[in-house]
Image (cartoon, grey):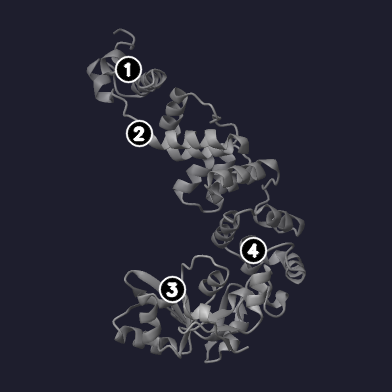
Amino acid sequence: MGATGSAAFKGAAWLKAPDLLSVMDALGTDHCRVVGGAVRDFLIGRAVRDIDIATDHQPEEASTRLRAAGIKVVPTGIAHGTVTAVVGGRPFEVTTLRHDVESFGRHARVAFHGDWEADAARRDFTMNALYMDAGGNLYDYFGGQEDLLAGRVRFIGDAAERIAEDALRILRFFRFHAWYGRGAPDADGLRACRQNASLLEILSIERVRDELLKLLGAPDPVALLQAMQEAGILERILPEAKLGGRLETLITLEHALEDISALRRLAALLDRDAAALLGIGKEFKLSNADARRLAAMATGGAPAKAGLAAKDLRAMVFRIGAEAFIDRAVLDNEPDDADAVQRLIEDARAFTPPTLPVTGHDLEAGGVAPGPAMGEALRALEEAWVASDFSLGKKALLATLPGE
């Protein structure tokens, strides 16, 4: 299919942004087009964020043209024809038109060419094979616009072949449907995902983790998680998952609060104790901060129920931090409590935990030797201080020590 120009497309403000235009002008507007997510999101009225550009220039020629225009070039994926052009701190991935000569799971040997339709044919879904030039002309070779507007996530060509080229496309199929689909997933795509589920075993845990968290960040991923479970896919990537009321309740409350967290939804999906969550966090190679945050959302922890007394709220925030408290408040309550939970969140963010006014030096000066006894004494003083709603000063706290 050739260009399908539209006055509405030509007037798109994001296409006129100076940083994007500088990259496209450097490449030559007849030699490049925006491709994929930016076009897809624009066509359905979503905000355009990351912008990828395809070009018929060879990678070396593209780099030379960009540098000649004073644009910084980073060879981020030069073996696959990708360089990153940086303008004013904003990155644009620029990739030469290509097709896969030989595929190795997530890796492929590629050949560069100047055939736009052949480049589109190697992509995963029709809605991701949409191109737009600087003039606002749309290029749609496989009915991607129609599929996008219909909420239909459809593989280009044979779904099983697309999956054999890259097993990550199984997870992307469900993730994209969660974000862009309507109704039941495409039957051919779902069948191919089910039949090739064993290929997921070759994927790195980092890639699986990233796709799962992107899926969980969708407005309502429950139906897609159920479809993954029925297709035997969820058990392969997260055998500990428990679909049910806890996750659905959380999602409803998150929407009421306008506060969505993929990590929080993962905790609800797992519904495990702290040790188990910490282990899963490490298995998924989460950052240390995210692994600790996940563990703090374990079942059985101190509840942060609506109506919690201000003194108890401050004590919890002091012990676990505001972020962990907010996670607990959203996980521990019902959608009907949204207003009360919002107040808990605001109070937690407004509270700045103070510092215990007694130090080890104070205890040593009072005759407590360094070591286990001092640690135990400090913990006891902290408990008394927190119980007083942080009102006891140094003198009063030291007076509680034995022998004082």
Residue picked out by circle 1:
392
- Asked if the residue under mark 1 is in contact with the one under mark 4, i.e. CB atoms within 8 Å, the reply is no
What is the number of the mark on residue 171? Answer: 4
Marks 3/1 in contact by CB < 8 Å: the verdict is no
Quarter of the rendering containing residue 380: top left
Dividing the picture into quadrants, the one containing residue 372 is top left
Label 3: which secondary element = helix
Mark 3 vs mark 2, foreground winner is 3
Quadrant of image for the N terminus: bottom right
Residue 351, horizontal then vertical, whole percent: 38, 33
Name the foreground residue: 389 vs 9.
9
- Classed neighbour count for the residue bearing mark 1: other residues with Cα under 10 Å, few (<14), some (14–19), many (≥20): some
Q: Which residue is mark 2?
A: 352
Label 2 and label 4: CA atoms lie apart by 41 Å
| SS class, disc 2 | loop
Helix, strand or loop under label 1:
loop
Residue type, label 1: Leu
Q: What is the three-letter code of the residue carrying label 2?
A: Thr
User: Counting residues from the N terminus, which is met first, the one under dot 4 or under dot 1?
Assistant: 4
Q: Residues within 10 Å of mark 2 (few under 14, many from 20)?
A: few
Residue 17 located left or right of residue 305: left
State which tag comes first along the sequence, 2 or 1.
Answer: 2
Verify CB contact (< 8 Å) between mark 2 and mark 4.
no
